[in-house]
Image: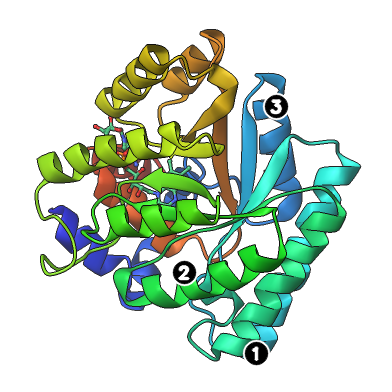
Amino acid sequence: MTKAVLLYLSTSEGFKNFLTRFKSFNNVTSRFVAGEELPQAVEAIHHLNQKKISASFDHLGEAISSEKEAGDEVREYISILDAIEENALDSNVSVKLTQLGLDIDRKLCFENARAIVEAAASRRNFVRIDMEDSTRTDSTLEIFRRLRDEFENVGIVIQSYLYRSEKDIEDLLGAEARMRLCKGAYKEPATVAFPKKKDVDANYIRLMEALLRSGVYHGIATHDENMIAATRQFASSRGIAADQFEFQMLYGVRRDLQETLINEGWRVRVYVPYGRSWYPYFMRRLAERPANIWFVMKNMMKG
Ligand SMILES: Cc1cc2nc3c(=O)[nH]c(=O)nc-3n(C[C@H](O)[C@H](O)[C@H](O)COP(=O)(O)OP(=O)(O)OC[C@H]3O[C@@H](n4cnc5c(N)ncnc54)[C@H](O)[C@@H]3O)c2cc1C
C-alpha cells in the first residue's frame, strides 16, 4: 500500500469504522497515541520527563464542525495547562487551528486561539500552532501573526516540503517568531510541494541552517538521522550551544534516538497526542513509514 493511499484513507470515515471493529486494533494505536483521556497523557509525559525529555501535549481533535466543539477544545487546552502546573510537568501544548474553528469562522478561531495563548501566558507556558495542509497555510500564518503581535509565548510550524517555506521563514524571522521545522505530513500537489524526498530533505537542511543562524530558539522536528546529523554538525561548526534549540520527535517513534540525543547532551521534546479523535493522526504516522503496517497487522492477528 502506498503512502498516497494511506493518506487518502486517513480522511475516510468508512475505513476507520472498518478498522475499529477489530478490538486488537485499539491496542495498536497506543504505540503512537498516549490514550483517549488527559490523565493518560499526563502519565506518559511524566515518564518522558523522568528521562529528561520535554513534551508537548496535543489534544487530537482536528476539523471540528461546530462552534460548541471549538469551545470544548479551548476548555480542554486550559485543563491541560492546569494539569501541567499541578503535576509540575516539563511540557508545553500544540494545537491545530481547525480544532479551534478555522473552517467555521476565522474570527471565532482567532478568539479561541487567543484564549489559549493568554491562559498559557498567565501560567508562563508556551503554545505551538501546528501547520495543517497547504489550503490552510495562509490563514494559519495570518492568525499566528496576529497572536505574535500581542504575545511572546506562541510559535508556529514550517514544512520543508512547501516551496513557499523559505520566504515564510524569512518573514517570520523578522518578527523573531519561534518555529518548529518539519518535513510536512499531508498529501500535497506538485504545484505547491516538492514531490521528491531528496528535494524535501535538501530544503530541510537549508531551512534548518537559516533557523539555527537566527539566534531565536527553534525546534528541529525529525526522526531522520541524516537531518539530525546535519543539524548537529551545523551547530557544532557554528559554535551554537546545545541549549540554543531543541530536537523534536513524535511519541512512540524512534525512542532509542530520543534517548541517545538526551544522553549526548542535546535537548529533546516529544509531541504527545491523546484524545478520542486519534484516527487521522494515526493513519498519517502509518503513511510515513509503511513498514508500520506490518506492526499493525501482526498485532491485529494476535487479538
Ligand atoms: C514534533 C513533531 C511535530 C510535527 N508537527 C507537524 C505539523 O505541525 N505539521 C505537519 O505537517 N507535520 C508535522 N510533523 C510530521 C512531519 O512533517 C513528518 O511527517 C514526520 O516527522 C516524518 O518525517 P521525518 O522528518 O521523521 O522524516 P522521514 O523521511 O519521513 O523519516 C525518516 C526516518 O524516520 C523514521 N520514521 C519517520 N516517521 C516514522 C513513523 N511514523 N514510525 C516509525 N518511524 C518513523 C524512519 O526510520 C524513517 O526512515 C511533526 C513531526 C514531529 C516530529
First-in-chain label (1 vs 2): 1
The answer to whether residue 250 is visible is: no
Q: Is mark 3 within 8 Å of ligand 1?
A: no
Q: Where residue 271 sits in the image (x, y, percent)? A: 54, 43
Distance CA(mark 3)–CA(mark 1): 35 Å
Quickly name the residue at label 3: 49
- Circle 1: residue type: Glu
Residue at 38% across, 70% down = 137
Q: Name the image quarter holding residue 87.
A: top right
Quickly name the residue at label 2: 141
Q: In this rendering, would 47 be left or right of 174?
A: right
Q: Nearer the viewer, residue 144 or 35?
A: 144
Q: Where residue 64 sits in the image (x, y, percent)? A: 54, 80
Q: Please say if the residues under marks 3 and 1 sit with CB atoms less than 8 Å apart.
A: no
Q: Nearer the viewer, mark 1 or mark 2?
A: 2
**Direction top: furthest residue:** 264
First-in-chain label (3 vs 1): 3
First-in-chain label (3 vs 2): 3
SS for dot 1: helix
The answer to whether residue 261 is visible is: yes
- Circle 3: residue type: Asn
Quickly name the residue at label 1: 67
Residue at 69% across, 54% down = 152
Q: In this rendering, would 219 be left or right of 284?
A: right
Q: Please say if the residues under marks 1 and 2 sit with CB atoms less than 8 Å apart.
A: no
**Direction front: furthest residue:** 174
